Amino acid sequence: MQKKIMPEFKTADELAAHQLKGLKWTVAHAYDNSDIYRSRLDRAGIAPGAVNSLDDLTKLPFTTADDLKSGYPFPLRCVPFEKIIRIHSSSGTTGKRKNICYTQKDVDDWTKFFARAYKMAGVTSQDRVQIAVGYGVWTAGAGFQSACEKVGAMALPVGPGNVDMQCQFLVDLQATVLCCTASMGLLMAEEVNKRGLCDKINIKKVIYGSERSSVTMRKKISDLFGGAELFDITGMTELYGPGAGIECPDHDCIHYWGDYYILEILDPDTLKPVPEGEWGEMVVTTLCKEAVPLIRYRTRDITRIIPGQCTCGTIMPRHSRIKGRTDDMFKFRAVNIYPSNIDSILSEIPDVGSEYQIHLFRDDSDRDIMRLIIELSEGADKTANTDMAAKVTQLIKKKLLVTPKVEVADYGTLPRSERKSKRVFDSRLQEDSIV
């Protein structure tokens, strides 16, 4: 069964031919079955038969999250209702939720390529997989579980939170793989150590997604779990769900499933392709998605294509770990900053922990202030707080050309969460703007 899970393409040309076939199908399918897509393609002067090469992709119009929200509750639907077997939804943090419809084929395809992700992480039928992510309308729980069952591993669907049950399952059921957010991974790793359970559990791998993690955070999770191997997994509700890509065993990239979608990297301002290897916005086009195909969907994620073939041996294309998003970037004194920039800098400094918060506000003179609260690592010297604050301030000033007000907190002071940790608190956004 597992041999059929991994892609069978032997060369990049074979993959490209498959992508062109899928692109032609997607454009024709969207044109024939969606008034919105048909209108967009007509305005762009693109008929389905006009797509003859992968280069024609750049002629196609973009799709955005606003298209999904404005089309609520069944946005961009391209199949009759009787073919829809499932609905998943985004978190809906702003405005209406982004509901996504699925046909049986969509669900089967998602399960198949998610199972590839498990296999790339080395998960087999001998593993017991503790799934500590959200169930319900979210894609996470359903995706992690169905793919786990596809590879024949034992699924332990605990869901998020409930630390007592998580610890009980780790000990009693001897889970070998933990699936979670990075924040939940850190929370559980610390909790296991706090309760003295290190010698009673059997975690070998942690597959995490949904949020970025720093080098320090990854090392902390691995160390506290006794050297567990970490795998960063990618995906989004719009693109089926999690499992659309995963870190390979060589741990230097994310492989994405190029036989299910095409990935472009564009300048988010000009929407033009950036040179290979440069950072930009990830834009995706699906190749066989039935219910809600995506044509040049702007994900807002920032990454870059890594050229060449990976040392792990697969020909599946690859990109860097997600650096940030075009919509969680903040501007401080004319400098564009992503939380991942802070992640990277803090990871360079010994005795600095993985948790931090950025508070942005304006003082009485209407001057922007950045207050950065960092946490010491476990066992660090608490008497060196002043020196530590000065060191962090100096390095951020050198690398980002801005000067924060750094405060050092004791280990364990900042809140942990089973969901995404909130990093940036920008009170400036609450003030009235003058046009």
Image: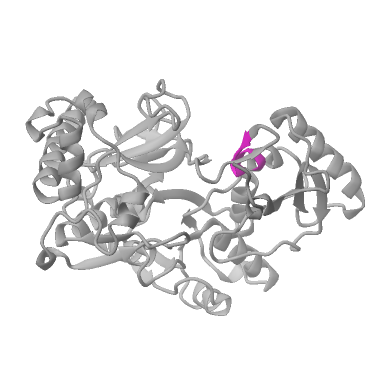
What span is colored magenta in the figure?
Answer: 336-342
**Residue situated furthest top in the rendering:** 275
Observer-nearest of 246 and 128 = 246
Q: Residue visible at 81% across and 48% down?
A: 363
Left or right: residue 245 compared with residue 409: left
Measuring from the top left, give residue 394's x and y in whole percent: 81, 33
- Height in image: 407 above or below 334? below
Left or right: residue 226 compared with residue 392: left
Measuring from the top left, give residue 270's x and y in whole percent: 42, 27
- Height in image: 5 above or below 194? above
Which color scheme did the rendering employ for the protein?
one colour
Q: Quadrant of the N terminus?
A: bottom left
Measuring from the top left, give residue 99's x and y in whole percent: 31, 62
Q: Quadrant of the C terminus?
A: top right
Q: Is residue 331 visible?
A: yes
Observer-nearest of 317 and 1 = 317
Q: Residue visible at 31% across and 54% down?
A: 68
Left or right: residue 407 compared with residue 47: right
- Height in image: 31 above or below 124? above
Asked whether 337 falls inside the magenta stretch, the response is yes
Observer-nearest of 46 and 21 = 46
Measuring from the top left, give residue 326's x and y in whole percent: 50, 40
The image quadrant that residue 304 belongs to is: top left
Q: Residue visible at 88% across and 49% down?
A: 385
Q: Residue visible at 92% across and 52% down?
A: 383
Q: Is residue 250 visible?
A: no
Asked whether 89 falls inside the magenta stretch, the response is no
Observer-nearest of 107 and 221 = 107
**Residue situated furthest front in the rendering:** 435
